[in-house]
Image: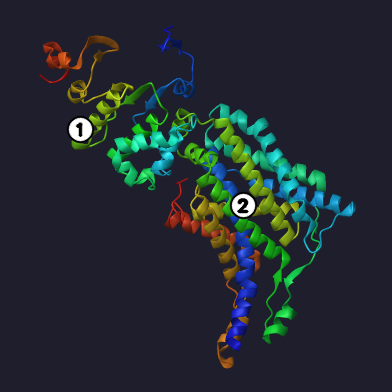
């Protein structure tokens, strides 16, 4: 029984949150990686694009709720997601046409594009706070839990409960679907293949008659979709506060680089590596030892390697470690 | 300012992609494949603008370079130098060119592979595609050429059939090493 309790504890506090947070990071890192491999710069504005997506979902779900459209047990934000995606894509394309295109036409170095993207990041962040304000916004409605701790305890008779929040379930399912769709698009469709070709060898792609502007447009459509879904899911799961997305850029970049930048599979692996290392390092293991060790062996302290305040630092640590040991990332990617 | 005509059309100001559309296939000397795409996807990219008869074209390229058929699902970046060169030529052929331009196709491949590559190039020419090639291995290249040009210091010094150029004493002494 103690053994099962221990397993449940790990599942409840590490596995499920890790899968959820990992999916959110993976979607974000995919956006970064795709921009990096096609447009060849590190897009620091991606966190704010995610924030823009989440903001769109919030405003739309407020609108829907005030008009009386709710879809119990689903959160309204998921129902309005397609419209929010269109808004985010439009924002990305406008930014590209107004700002990034100018630098692309000049064949600017990727460092210059990176600096430009930091400008876009601050602008977008400001725009978002101007529209919805800097405060915390909880926009979750619908059924809160798929599996409640008490229900689980009643069914299994264990001391430890296992909860699965609706947002966690939705995050994991939606991420899997989106990733399958993305890989199908990149590997099976003519347009997807032309995007990979363009990222591989720009000159030869143009010699094959691939239209660069169309590739760029599709890149922003994909990025906008990923950003909006990732941002909305993150906001639903935690709560929406514009400033958190500024901090989110770090774990997302770490995920993309740890996995191997420019490589979509790497971005997904990286997302989960970062998410799980944050959780594993900041988790208090006392209770686990309580279940797994004889009672007189259980130590006194919390057995926490680092306090949760250091969460962000861990993704930075992972980034440095990977760059030192394997600069191409876990999965073969480009060296930055 | 010089003007350039291709098939009776002024192409002086056309960007490279437009020239491909007019029927000028081009194999650059370096970076001439998509390394992370499979061999088959590389060839498909060649047929990007014109998807008609894509399967027949694939058959044609695979007949010409049978090794590519065996490796069609492998990433092109994992192939040997000679095989990469075959992928590059194959991709250009998929654009259904009237004229196939090759920039130093033998650069970086072993002599044996070069031999077979030249045989294939001759075969392409015999099947009705004009081939224009810039080559450093002048002797071997002239052997398979209908018409050769010897360029030096930006000037065209000799124009003759491949075999006559090979026999030409001046050309031999100055450019072919005796």
Does residue A237 sit above or below B16 in this rendering?
Answer: below
Residue at (62% x, 79% y) in the render: A8
In the rendered image, residue A61, in percent from the top left (x then y), is placed at: 81, 52
Q: How far apart are the two marked residues, 2 and 1, measured between alpha carbons?
A: 50 Å
Chain identifier of the residue bearing label 1 in the image: B
Q: Residue furthest right?
A: A67
Q: Is residue A132 left or right of residue B56?
A: right
Q: Secondary structure at mark 1?
A: helix
In this rendering, does residue A133 appear at all? Answer: no
In which quadrant of the rendered view does residue A315 lie? Answer: bottom right
Residue named by callout 2 = A28
Q: Can see residue A219?
A: yes
Query: Residue A41's spot in the image, x, y percent?
Result: 55, 40
Mark 1, residues whose alpha carbon is within 10 Å: few (<14), some, or many (≥20)? some
B157 vs A301, left or right, is left
Image location (x, y in percent) of residue A198: 49, 36
The residue that label 1 is drawn on is: B115
Quadrant position of residue B104: top left
> Can you say which quadrant of the picture contains the N terminus of chain A?
bottom right
> A43 or A281: which is nearer to us?
A43
Q: Residue at horizontal 85%, vertical 49%?
A: A63
The answer for which chain carries disc 2 is: A
Position in image of residue B71 (x %, y %): 34, 46
């Amino acid at each position: 029984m103690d053994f099962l309790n221990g397993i449940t504890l790990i599942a409840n506090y590490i596995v499920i949150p890790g899968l959820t947070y990992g999916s959110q990071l993976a979607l974000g890192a995919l956006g970064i990686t795709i921009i990096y491999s096609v447009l060849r710069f590190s897009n620091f504005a991606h966190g704010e694009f995610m924030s823009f997506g989440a903001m769109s979902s919030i405003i739309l779900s407020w609108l829907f709720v005030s008009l009386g459209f709710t879809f119990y047990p689903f959160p309204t934000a998921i129902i309005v997601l397609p419209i929010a995606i269109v808004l985010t894509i439009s924002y990305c394309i406008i930014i590209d046409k107004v700002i990034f295109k100018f630098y692309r036409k000049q064949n600017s170095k990727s460092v210059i594009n990176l600096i430009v993207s930091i400008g876009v990041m601050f602008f977008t962040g400001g725009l978002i706070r101007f529209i919805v304000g800097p405060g915390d916004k909880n926009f979750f409605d619908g059924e809160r839990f798929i599996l409640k701790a008490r229900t689980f305890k009643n069914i299994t008779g264990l001391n430890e409960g296992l909860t699965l929040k609706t947002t966690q379930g939705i995050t994991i399912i939606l991420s899997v679907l989106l990733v399958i769709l993305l890989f199908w698009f990149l590997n099976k469709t003519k347009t997807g293949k032309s995007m990979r070709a363009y990222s591989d060898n720009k000159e030869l792609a143009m010699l094959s008659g691939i239209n660069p502007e169309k590739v760029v447009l599709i890149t922003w459509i994909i990025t906008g979709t990923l950003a909006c879904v990732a941002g909305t899911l993150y906001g639903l799961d935690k709560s929406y506060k514009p400033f958190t997305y500024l901090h989110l850029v770090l774990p997302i970049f770490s995920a993309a680089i740890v996995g191997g930048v420019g490589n979509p599979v790497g971005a997904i692996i990286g997302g989960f590596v970062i998410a799980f290392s944050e959780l594993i390092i900041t988790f208090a293991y006392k209770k686990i030892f309580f279940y797994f060790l004889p009672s007189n062996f259980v130590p006194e302290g919390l057995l926490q390697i680092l306090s949760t305040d250091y969460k962000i630092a861990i993704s930075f640590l992972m980034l440095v470690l990977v760059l030192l040991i394997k600069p191409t990332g876990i999965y073969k990617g480009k060296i930055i | 300012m010089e003007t350039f005509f291709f098939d009776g059309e002024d192409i002086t100001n056309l960007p490279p992609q437009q020239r491909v559309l007019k029927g000028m296939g081009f194999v650059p000397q370096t970076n001439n494949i998509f390394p992370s795409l499979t061999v088959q996807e590389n060839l498909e990219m060649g047929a990007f603008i014109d998807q008609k008869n894509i399967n027949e074209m694939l058959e044609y390229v695979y007949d010409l370079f049978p090794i590519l058929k065996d490796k069609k699902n492998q990433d092109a970046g994992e192939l040997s130098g000679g095989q990469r060169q075959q992928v590059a030529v194959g991709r250009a052929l998929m654009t259904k060119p009237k004229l196939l331009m090759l920039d130093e196709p033998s650069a970086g491949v072993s002599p044996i592979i070069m031999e077979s590559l030249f045989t294939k190039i001759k075969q392409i020419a015999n099947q009705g595609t004009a081939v224009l090639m810039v080559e450093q291995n002048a002797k071997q290249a002239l052997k398979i050429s209908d018409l050769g040009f010897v360029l030096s210091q930006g000037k065209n010094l000799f124009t003759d059939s491949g075999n006559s150029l090979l026999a030409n004493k001046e050309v031999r002494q100055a450019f072919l090493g005796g």
